[in-house]
Image (tube, rainbow, N blue to C red):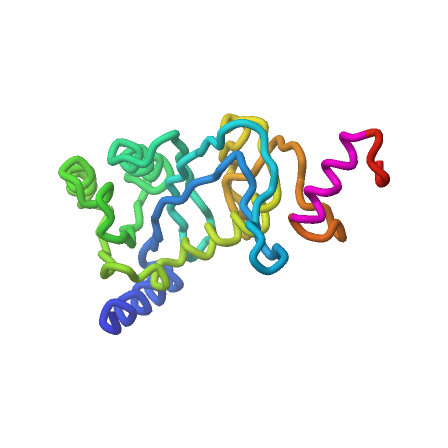
C-alpha cells in the first residue's frame, strides 16, 4: 500500500511538471430517489423520506484529470465492461493521439474491479498502451483514488435530499474546474425542508399539506 502511495506521489509530481496526464478513474451512480446527508431521526426510528415510484439509477463512469481538475464523464444505465470501454473512447477524444499534434503520455489509475479487469476491458487498455499506461491500485484502497472525493461531493452537495423526476434528467455537463458532474437538471421535492424537524418532521409536514383537516394544514 505504501509503495503504491509513493508511486502515485511521483506520478502527481510528473503531472504538475507537465510531463504526463494523470487520470483517476472509477464508477459511481446517481439515484432518482434522494440520498440522505446530514440528516437525523429519533432514536430507533427508520430513517426514510417518502418518494414516488421505484428508484432508478444512472451509472457514472468518470476520469479525473488530476492536474487540470477536469472531469470526463460517460453515463449509462449499467456498469459493465462495455460502459468502461465507452469511457476509454471518451478519453481517446479528449487525451488520445491526434494527427499533427503532440500528445502527452497519460497514466490512468484504476482499481481491480471486475469491469476494469475483464478480458474486454484489458483488451481496450492494451489497444491504448502506446499512449495510456495503467497504475493499478491494491484491493480496498479507495483512499488512494482522487476521484472518490468527486463522487462524495456529488452525492453530498448536488444529489442529496432531492427526488428526480426520471433518470433521464440526470445528465453529464461540460466539465469545468472545481465542479462535480453529473449535475441534476430537473428535480421535484427537495427534502427534508430546513427546520422541518428532520425526516420525521418532514413526513408530518407532508401529511399536513395533503390533509385539509389537519391542525397544521
Quadrant where the N terminus is found in the figure: bottom left
User: Which residue is drawn at the image coordinates 31% and 56% (left, top)?
Assistant: 20
Q: What are the residue bounds of the magenta stretch?
A: 200-211
Quadrant of the rendered image containing residue 83: top left
Residue 147 seen in this snapshot: yes
Residue 38 % position (x, y): 60, 57
Whole-percent x, y for residue 108 in the image: 29, 51
On the rendered image, what quadrant is the C terminus found in?
top right
Q: Is residue 114 left or right of residue 40?
A: left
At 67% from the left and 48% from the top, the residue drawn is: 200
Q: What residue sits 61% from the left and 37% below the top?
A: 50
Examine the rendering and report whether any part of residue 100 can be seen. Answer: no
Q: How many marks?
A: 0
Residue 16 locus on image (x, y percent): 40, 63
Between residue 175 and residue 19, name the one nearer to us. 175
* Residue 203 belongs to magenta span: yes
Q: Residue 106: horizontal and vertical position, in percent?
A: 29, 51
Relative vertical location of residue 108 with respect to residue 94 in this rendering, above or below = below
Amino acid at each position: 500500500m505504501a509503495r503504491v502511495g509513493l508511486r502515485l506521489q511521483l506520478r502527481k509530481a510528473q503531472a504538475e511538471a507537465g510531463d504526463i496526464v494523470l487520470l483517476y478513474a472509477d464508477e459511481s451512480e446517481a439515484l432518482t430517489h434522494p440520498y440522505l446527508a446530514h440528516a437525523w431521526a429519533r432514536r430507533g426510528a427508520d430513517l426514510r423520506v417518502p418518494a414516488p415510484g421505484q428508484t432508478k439509477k444512472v451509472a457514472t463512469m468518470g476520469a479525473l484529470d488530476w492536474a487540470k481538475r477536469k472531469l470526463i464523464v460517460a453515463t449509462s444505465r449499467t456498469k459493465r465492461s462495455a460502459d468502461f470501454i465507452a469511457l476509454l473512447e471518451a478519453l481517446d477524444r479528449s487525451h488520445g493521439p491526434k494527427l499533427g499534434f503532440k500528445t502527452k503520455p497519460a497514466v490512468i489509475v484504476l482499481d481491480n474491479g471486475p469491469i476494469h479487469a475483464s478480458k474486454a476491458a484489458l483488451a481496450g487498455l492494451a489497444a491504448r498502451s502506446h499512449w495510456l499506461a495503467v497504475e493499478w491500485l491494491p484491493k480496498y484502497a479507495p483512499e488512494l483514488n482522487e476521484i472518490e472525493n468527486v463522487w462524495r461531493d456529488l452525492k453530498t452537495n448536488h444529489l442529496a435530499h432531492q427526488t428526480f423526476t426520471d433518470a433521464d434528467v440526470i445528465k453529464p455537463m461540460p466539465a469545468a474546474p472545481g465542479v462535480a458532474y453529473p449535475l441534476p437538471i430537473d428535480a421535484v421535492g427537495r427534502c427534508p425542508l430546513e427546520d422541518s424537524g428532520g425526516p420525521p418532521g418532514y413526513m408530518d409536514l407532508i401529511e399536513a399539506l395533503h390533509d385539509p383537516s389537519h391542525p397544521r394544514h
